[in-house]
């Protein structure tokens, strides 16, 4: 699979074949977990070739865990009930309504005054 995985250069690959059997016992998929990780991580051993299959065990375990992890569920956040903010808004609205009503009264009074009603 990779020039860094060469049993002729590193005999430890032959003596550590029990690790490959352990991967099978762990239930790791050869096609989905083992082969992709060995291909991806084999070149990282440069310049020294991989000397044992244990080099890949942790990465294969992470890949398997990531692949078999249940999908995350979305939990919408509950809105905080902020009565103080609502009260502030209502006070602001009341002030605006009073200001508008005062402006309307002032406009009407000026109109009456200009008509000579005073």
Image (cartoon, rainbow, N blue to C red):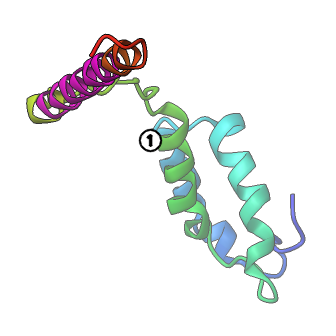
Residue 92: quarter of image: top left
- State the extent of the magenta-drawn residues as a range: 87-106
- Residue 91 lies in the magenta-colored region: yes
**Quarter in which the N terminus is drawn:** bottom right
Q: Position of residue 106 (x, y in %)?
A: 31, 23
Q: What type of secondary structure mainly makes up the magenta span?
A: helix
The residue closer to the viewer here, 96 or 83, is: 96
**Quarter in which the C terminus is drawn:** top left
- Please name the residue that numbered disc 1 is placed on: 26
Residue 105: quarter of image: top left
Left or right of 19 on screen, residue 42: right
Q: Position of residue 22 (x, y in %)?
A: 48, 49
For the point 42% across and 12% down, the residue is 115
* Secondary structure category for the residue under label 1: loop
Q: Position of residue 60 (x, y in %)?
A: 57, 52
Residue 83: quarter of image: top left
For the point 87% across and 65% down, the residue is 2
Left or right of 36 on screen, residue 99: left
Residue extending farthest to the right is 3
């Amino acid at each position: 699979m990779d020039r860094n995985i060469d049993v002729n250069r590193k005999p430890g690959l032959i003596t550590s074949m029990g690790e490959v059997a352990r991967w099978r016992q762990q239930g790791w998929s050869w096609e989905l977990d083992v082969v992709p990780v060995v291909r991806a991580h084999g070149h990282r051993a440069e310049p020294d070739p991989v000397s044992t299959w244990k080099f890949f065990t942790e990465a294969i375990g992470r890949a398997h865990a990531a692949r078999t992890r249940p999908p995350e569920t979305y939990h919408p956040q509950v809105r905080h009930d902020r009565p103080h903010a609502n009260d502030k808004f209502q006070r602001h609205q009341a002030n605006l309504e009073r200001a508008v009503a005062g402006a309307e009264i002032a406009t009407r009074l000026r109109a009456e005054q200009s008509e000579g009603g005073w």
